Image: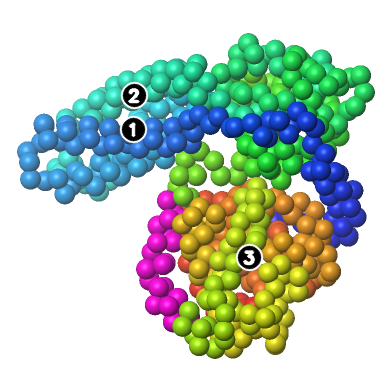
């Protein structure tokens, strides 16, 4: 778990939030021009990776079944089809574990193909061992198994070479470029920009630089690119225009500068890389990753990226549609009950912070009397609150009031699972949430959710103390760092259990 000292958080907030506020009000003219310019978005790397995985799995499965049809007497597909599908699924898992399904990996030849063939060999070895272990040798043809292994290896080589050619073509055309900013300035940043121009110009669309130094070491223009502001300004900049990658041009020896930079930027959903061009220390190749031919150290990654985005998108849509169908009778009865008890609309809309701090309007069933509605949540609901109707008390206690947020999920504004979106003016101990907890906005590196890790652990409802909002934030950050589809599924399953067992704070 992340641990946050409330006193330290409040003390540090004053200076940091003030700096961030100044940044938001005084971005440079160059930064404003970039924000105002239309964003040319090319092909999404996540989509390329996702489609490549699906096509590769389909080709392997088709080959396996085609060889079965050719060699084996028809009439026994019940044995072969499940084994073929399981082997293809296992292959996909191992290809990902070997990091072969990455845009950077697609650009290589021997590294990509070598890792892929090793994973495919492991799949076939496990399949052979499984057939022997379950004494199913009479059910499966050895000729089929060997043919599928050899044919699959040839198919994978051909597919990966074709995929490499396609990715190289898109790269040359600039369609896979990532919107990038450099943190740092002066001669060191100039060297990095020259390296980008020489080997990574088709990978990177450079927007400009951010640097806290304001002396001669950091001029306003470096190699033709403008200094757009200080590091604190980058937070506001990245929330108003898409930024995919932050490249840091600082030496490893500048530990304090690097740490200060990370402390400010870790709240953003971007990849952060420290360029190795300034380091005099030489590491093994395994210590580096690469942007083009530029060696970098990975300092922070987007919490959910590439193929995982596709997994989560599908999970959200499937669960939301299923829940709407199954819970529609409950929602209809709730709407009727609200109308019968008090005048006013059935639904209540409220502004909340979404992914990367963008404003979204979430839907809820109205639980308060119309004349006492609090759109900004300036005053939290407490036990026995007279503003809450009888129906409202029940639906808040059972979280039925949040079911309309399934429509927010279908619109892509929320996820089924994620940090809960808080009201903008919500307070704990008379402090706004972001004033009470340092790093609060790091919750917004992923889409907010209808339910989350904090909620299933009982941290829902009123947050009248700093300790309570700290616990929410700690659980949210733990979820972000440990996200997986299985974790999401576990939280969904445990949500109704927690509503019964841990609802003492919900009013």
| Few, some or many residues within 10 Å of mark 2 (<14, 14–19, 20+) | some
**Mark 1 highlights which residue?**
56
102 vs 497: above or below: above
In reply to whether residue 170 is colored magenta, the answer given is: no
The quadrant holding residue 429 is bottom right
Say which label, 2 or 3, has the lower sequence index. Answer: 2
Boundaries of the magenta span: 314-334
In the picture, measured across the screen, residue 454 lies left or right of residue 493, that is right
What main secondary structure does the magenta stretch of the protein show? helix
Circle 3: element type? strand
The quadrant holding residue 422 is bottom right
In the picture, measured across the screen, residue 466 lies left or right of residue 457, that is right
- Compare residues 41 and 356 and report the one nearer the observer: 41
In the picture, measured across the screen, residue 502 lies left or right of residue 88, that is right
**Mark 2 highlights which residue?**
159
Q: Residue 452, position in %: x, y? A: 58, 62
- Whether the residues at callouts 2 and 1 have beta carbons within 8 Å, the answer is yes
261 vs 334: above or below: above
* Quadrant (top left, top right, bottom left, bottom right) of the C terminus: bottom right
Labelled disc at residue 228: none
3D distance between C-alphas at marks 2 and 3: 49 Å
Circle 2: element type? helix
**Mark 3 highlights which residue?**
350
| Few, some or many residues within 10 Å of mark 1 (<14, 14–19, 20+) | some
The residue shown at (18%, 47%) is 79
3D distance between C-alphas at marks 1 and 3: 44 Å
The residue shown at (26%, 37%) is 61
| Few, some or many residues within 10 Å of mark 3 (<14, 14–19, 20+) | some
3D distance between C-alphas at marks 2 and 1: 7 Å
267 vs 53: above or below: below
- Compare residues 99 and 224 and report the one nearer the observer: 224
Q: Residue 360, position in %: x, y? A: 61, 56
């Amino acid at each position: 778990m992340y641990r946050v000292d409330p006193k330290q958080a409040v003390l540090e907030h004053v200076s940091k939030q003030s700096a961030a506020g100044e940044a938001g009000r005084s971005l440079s003219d160059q930064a404003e021009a970039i924000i105002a310019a239309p964003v040319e978005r090319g092909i999404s790397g996540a989509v390329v990776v996702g489609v490549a995985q699906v096509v590769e799995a389909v080709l392997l499965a088709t080959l396996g079944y085609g060889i079965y049809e050719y060699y084996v007497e028809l009439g026994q597909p019940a044995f072969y089809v499940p084994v073929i599908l399981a082997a293809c699924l296992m292959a996909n898992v191992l290809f990902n574990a070997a990091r072969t399904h990455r845009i950077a990996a697609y650009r290589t030849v021997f590294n990509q193909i070598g890792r892929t063939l090793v994973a495919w060999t492991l799949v076939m070895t496990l399949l052979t061992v499984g057939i022997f272990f379950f004494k199913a040798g009479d059910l499966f043809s050895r000729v089929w198994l060997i043919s599928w292994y050899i044919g699959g290896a040839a198919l994978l080589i051909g597919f990966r070479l074709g995929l490499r050619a396609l990715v190289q073509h898109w790269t040359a055309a600039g369609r896979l470029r990532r919107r990038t900013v450099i943190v740092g300035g002066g001669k060191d940043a100039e060297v990095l920009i020259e390296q980008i121009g020489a080997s990574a110009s088709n990978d990177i669309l450079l927007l400009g630089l951010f640097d806290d130094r304001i002396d001669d070491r950091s001029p306003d223009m470096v190699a033709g690119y403008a200094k757009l502001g200080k590091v604190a300004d980058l937070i506001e900049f990245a929330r108003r225009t898409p930024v995919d990658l932050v490249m840091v041009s600082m030496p490893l020896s500048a530990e304090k500068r690097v740490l200060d930079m990370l402390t400010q930027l870790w709240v953003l959903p971007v990849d952060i890389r420290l360029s190795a061009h300034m380091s005099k220390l030489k590491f093994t190749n395994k210590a580096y990753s690469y942007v083009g031919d530029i060696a970098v150290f990975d300092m922070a990654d987007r919490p959910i990226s590439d193929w995982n985005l596709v997994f989560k998108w599908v999970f959200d849509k499937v669960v939301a549609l299923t829940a709407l169908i199954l819970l529609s009778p409950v929602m209809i009865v709730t709407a009727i009950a609200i109308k019968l008890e008090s005048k006013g609309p059935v639904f209540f809309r409220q502004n909340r912070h979404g992914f990367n701090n963008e404003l979204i309007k979430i839907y809820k069933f109205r639980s308060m009397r119309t004349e006492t509605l609090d759109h900004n949540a300036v005053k939290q609901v407490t036990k026995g609150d007279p503003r809450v109707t009888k129906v409202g008390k029940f639906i808040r206690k059972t979280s039925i009031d949040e079911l309309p947020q399934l429509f927010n999920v279908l619109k892509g504004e929320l996820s089924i699972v994620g940090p809960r979106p808080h009201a903008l003016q919500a307070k704990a101990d008379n402090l706004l949430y972001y004033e009470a907890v340092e790093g609060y906005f790091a919750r917004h590196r992923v889409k907010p959710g209808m339910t989350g890790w904090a909620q299933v652990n009982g941290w829902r409802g009123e947050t009248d103390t700093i300790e309570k909002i700290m616990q929410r934030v700690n659980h949210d950050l733990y979820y972000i760092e440990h996200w997986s589809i299985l974790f999401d599924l576990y939280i969904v399953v445990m949500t109704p259990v927690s509503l019964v067992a841990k609802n003492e704070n919900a009013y």
